[in-house]
Image (cartoon, coloured by chain):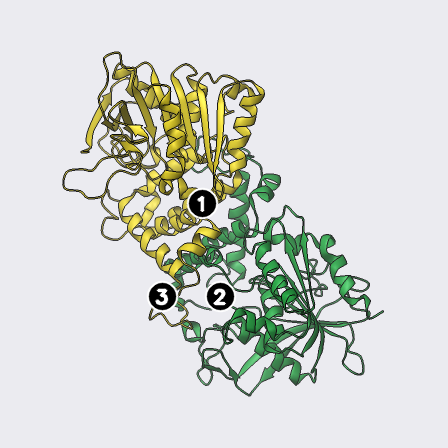
Chain colours: A green, B yellow
């Protein structure tokens, strides 16, 4: 499957939760499958912190498919033979939608730190605007993992009649201080890196040599995406060949992994976008804007399917179970699946076979 | 109780596990209580990563007592009316024992990165030399938490007949990649901080303004010392007064805590020492030098008391239980206590009341 990328430009303002306005703005997105005549077969896919709209398929000349290619495609759990799948890049991200490095109209220079704080609610709001522009006023389903799972839940609360089914993986109802603390490593490391220059770096400043601060922050990220068992299985106490055990900077395999992955990452992701998206994750709280979490969840009309992973050390299974219990008490339609996994939080990107069945099940009623 | 500090100088070499030699070297230590005539009442206390020999009592003009003052003192769990308690600063630490900032004899300049890698085995070896110099050839007990618990266990394995009882808290038999990964944040953040200058900073360079890299690494440390529940209890999702929720750098309480504690810390701890001690923790493996972990543990003649904490997210309870199970299978004398706690790894410094009884119990046979 070849991926197609489009950009939608909005000249109307996006009213943000902060009271600020983003105007103009644009959203880059991909779609897979064909929109049917009555536009009743649309599934929205939401990405995580460092993900993008490139959820499935491969680009011309590229080998690596999108981040959820294993479950989106012909005859896959999200079947593009039947459904029109939309995947957008969130506002604030560096992969093509309006972000801190976009022009701060009418000036021609980037927003940088003048970019307004964007919340999960705002990301969802922007996606809703895109759908309106495309003439789509109802969704068959919304699905996402981690920050994508937050968006799916926020959608369910803010626009109760908009989707039939919500599938949220490895997420939570409000970000806990544990996660905020992991993110804090990145915030401090980025801010204190002299090359960050308070956001006043040149656009391509880190293409050759990534920003150290972002790489360092990303190590904390990787820790939170894995878990002790996953690391035992993946690295054990293996030591890098030729790095003497008694050399101060000799490395264990896990250290090499962290260095390699984070240094590459820091060349390919914008530090300002990282700060803004992390802020969106930190401020995520389904209850905000409503009287309580209970009141927020009570608004939901969609069927909600919650999928957690037993070894998730970032958003723990009990957080997802909490939503399910509330919905059950309210006699709202929800299901909860805890997938046994040793992959930690990353399981939602890795162990697709273990939850593809749950997703398929959601769509069997369409057969 | 007033603390007394002494320093012991060694002109004989310390042979290190790496094959390198430390010569001369010195160890700073404190003692509490009185050595009895037959020197049979000595208890050795071992400190953790950023701890020091100042385990109990208060210095003249100081208000803050030593780090385990709650359990070391007259009539306390480690009763200084009965026992002579010794607490040394480990080799490599910046609180007075030989460290990377010590003179690299015969030159008058500091070792810096020429300092040899020191292991837990080496730390224990040095302590053993100190005890020999003091004419102490047998210990009533050795006790420590975290890296101190590693030292207690290493002592038990390397010098099987040296102590009657070993009390190890919140430690492990070999450091897992999970912990090495947390340490990696500090290693990278320190190395990549321009003011670290590859270790060539001036001795007092960070007294006024701490090294950012050390502060950033320490955030990862604090995460690993706490746990999700501890953070919920301590911080919740509280936001710092007057930090606008929609300000990019506005802070949650947990973020303020991290900033405050780590910035202070980075003024008071030497980054080179941090790198070297972290290396000692990473390389900790009771099995090294023996055929297997089984063979290492089989050497132990002391009674071993293992205390873990249910919410410890750095060294998990099952790691301590693993040692106990091995010893039980071998019919060696061991006990295992899992303390219920929501304080995470830090519990060994905080919830003293919850395990003081276990320690007292060890010494009841002396009554």
Which residue is labeled 1 in the image?
B344
Name the foreground residue: A255 vs B168: B168
User: Residue A193, image x and y in percent?
Assistant: 38, 58
Residue A81 occupies quadrant? bottom right
Please state the chain letter of the residue tagged with numbered disc 3 in the rendered image: B
Identify the mark nearer the N-term, 3 or 1.
3
Q: Quadrant of the C terminus of chain A?
A: bottom right
Q: Position of residue B50 (x, y in %)?
A: 34, 40
In this rendering, the answer to whether A251 lies above or below A269 is above
The x, y position of residue B5, in whole percent, is 20, 30
Residue at the far bottom: name it: A12
> Does dot 1 land on a helix, a strand or a loop?
helix
Pick whichever, A208 or B293, lies toward us: B293
Q: Nearer the viewer, mark 2 or mark 3?
A: 3
Residue bearing mark 2:
A204
Q: Looking at the image, do the residues carrying marks 2 and 3 touch, with CB atoms under 8 Å apart?
A: no
Q: Is residue B298 above or below residue A109?
A: above
On residue A65, the disc is none
Residue A77 in view in this figure: no
Circle 2 marks a residue in which chain?
Answer: A
Q: Nearer the viewer, mark 3 or mark 1?
A: 1
- Reply above or below: A161 against B303: below
Q: Which residue is mark 3?
A: B240
Position of the N terminus of chain A by quadrant: bottom right
**A4 or A186, which is in the foreground?**
A186
Label 3 Cα neighbours within 10 Å, binned few <14 / some 14-19 / many ≥20: some
């Amino acid at each position: 499957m070849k991926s197609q990328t489009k950009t939608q430009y909005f000249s109307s303002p996006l009213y943000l939760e902060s009271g600020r306005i983003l105007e103009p703005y644009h959203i880059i997105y991909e779609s897979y499958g064909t929109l049917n005549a009555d536009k009743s077969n649309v599934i929205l896919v939401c990405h995580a912190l460092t993900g993008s709209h490139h959820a499935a398929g491969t680009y011309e000349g590229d080998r690596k498919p999108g981040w959820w290619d294993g479950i989106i495609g012909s005859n896959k759990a999200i079947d593009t033979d039947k459904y029109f799948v939309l995947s957008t890049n969130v506002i604030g991200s560096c992969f093509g939608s309006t972000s801190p490095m976009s022009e701060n109209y009418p000036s021609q220079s980037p927003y940088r730190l003048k970019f307004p704080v964007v919340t999960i609610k705002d990301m969802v709001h922007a996606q809703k605007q895109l759908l309106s522009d495309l003439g789509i006023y109802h969704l068959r389903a919304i699905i996402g993992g981690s920050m994508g799972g937050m968006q799916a839940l926020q959608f369910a609360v803010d626009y109760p009649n908009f989707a039939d089914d919500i599938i949220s993986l490895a997420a939570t109802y409000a970000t806990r201080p544990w996660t905020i603390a992991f993110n804090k490593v990145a915030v401090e490391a980025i801010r204190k890196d002299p090359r960050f220059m308070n956001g006043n770096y040149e656009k391509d400043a880190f293409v050759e040599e990534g920003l150290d601060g972002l790489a360092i922050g990303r190590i904390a990220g990787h820790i939170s995406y894995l878990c002790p068992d996953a690391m035992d299985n993946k690295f054990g106490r293996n030591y890098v060949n030729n790095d003497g055990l008694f050399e101060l900077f000799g490395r264990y395999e896990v250290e090499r992994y962290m260095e390699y992955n984070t240094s590459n990452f820091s060349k390919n992701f914008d530090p300002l976008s990282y700060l803004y998206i992390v802020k969106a994750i930190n401020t995520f709280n389904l209850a905000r804007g409503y009287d309580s979490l209970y009141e927020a969840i009570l608004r939901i009309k969609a069927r909600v399917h919650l999928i957690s992973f037993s070894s998730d050390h970032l958003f723990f299974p009990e957080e997802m179970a909490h939503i399910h219990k509330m919905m059950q008490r309210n006699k709202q339609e929800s299901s909860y699946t805890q997938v046994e996994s040793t992959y930690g939080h990353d399981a939602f990107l890795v162990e697709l076979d273990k939850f593809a069945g749950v997703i398929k099940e959601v769509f069997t009623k369409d057969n």
